[in-house]
Image: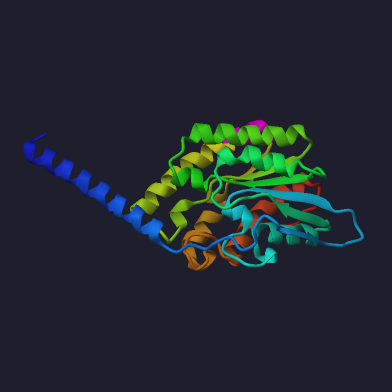
Amino acid sequence: MTRGATVALVAGAIGGATVLAAEAVAARARRYARPELGMAMRTTVGNPERPPLRVVLLGDTTALGVGVSDVAETVGGQLAQLLAEAGATIALSSVAVAGARSADLPTQVARSLLGDRPDLAVILIGANDATRLARPGEVAATLGAAVRRLRDAGVAVVVGTCPDLGAVRAVAPPLRHLMGWYGRRVARAQAVAALLAGARVVDLAAQVGPVFRADAGMLCYDGYHPSADGYRVIAYALFPDAAAALNVASSR
């Protein structure tokens, strides 16, 4: 390699790093949606005369429903409605926390097992691990341990792996592309660990990522968290495995 080519390569690398750093600063400075529902999200959907099936959500802002202000618009609320339409009565609750990472799952699992045992736990986690460049193997190991603990307690588990971070609009390319690539690495590791631990796994990046990339309306005003429409798409992706885990007939 000539000296000129070497200088050009180094300059390009420095320039690329500068662009990524600037985009990261800009992304952090944006105004993002805040949690409105808190951890008291509880609702019962379906025939009140039937014994309810208890469904608890664990994870991060997606599980909590950041970006909407009505429980019925959250992924949990819309999933509960789909299960109710299939004939179940669902008692929905959440122990999810905005900004949570996989390392926070042990505390959430402990909280989910207080009181009446849930019939199904839905775990949506991974985005914050990916954006902070956590090691995929460590993320997967923590998730696997959480799934095993729930399964040992007799709880069915559905895991939605890291979503398609390349679909967010709050971050500009090339940082958005880098986030998408790293998110896929995290999701692959999560899928293996969750399956081995006994969970049903939904690859959210594969199943709903293309819709989010094509339609800006899948995201709320901040361009990062899902909108009510986005949560509905995610709920539809989770529904078949959730219905199977609860032995609820699914015709969708």
Which is more toward the observer, 57 or 235? 57
Q: Is residue 129 above or below residue 135?
A: below
In the rendered image, which quarter is residue 148 located in? top right
Q: Taking the image as drawn, is residue 26 in sight?
A: yes
Tell me where the magenta segment starts and ends, as one range. Answer: 192-198
Q: Quadrant of the N terminus?
A: top left
Against 204, is 153 above or below?
above
Residue 152: x and y in percent read: 75, 32
**145 sits to left or right of 174:** right
Q: Position of residue 115 (x, y in %)?
A: 81, 44
The structure residue drawn at horizontal position 80% and vertical position 42%, both measured from the top left corner, is 117
- Residue 53 lies left or right of residue 220; in this view the side is right
Residue 99 percent across, percent down from the top left:
54, 50
**Residue 144 image position (x, y, % from top left):** 62, 33
Above or below, 176 relative to 81:
above
- Colour scheme shown: rainbow
Nearer-the-camera pick, 51 or 185: 51
Dividing the picture into quadrants, the one containing residue 77 is bottom right
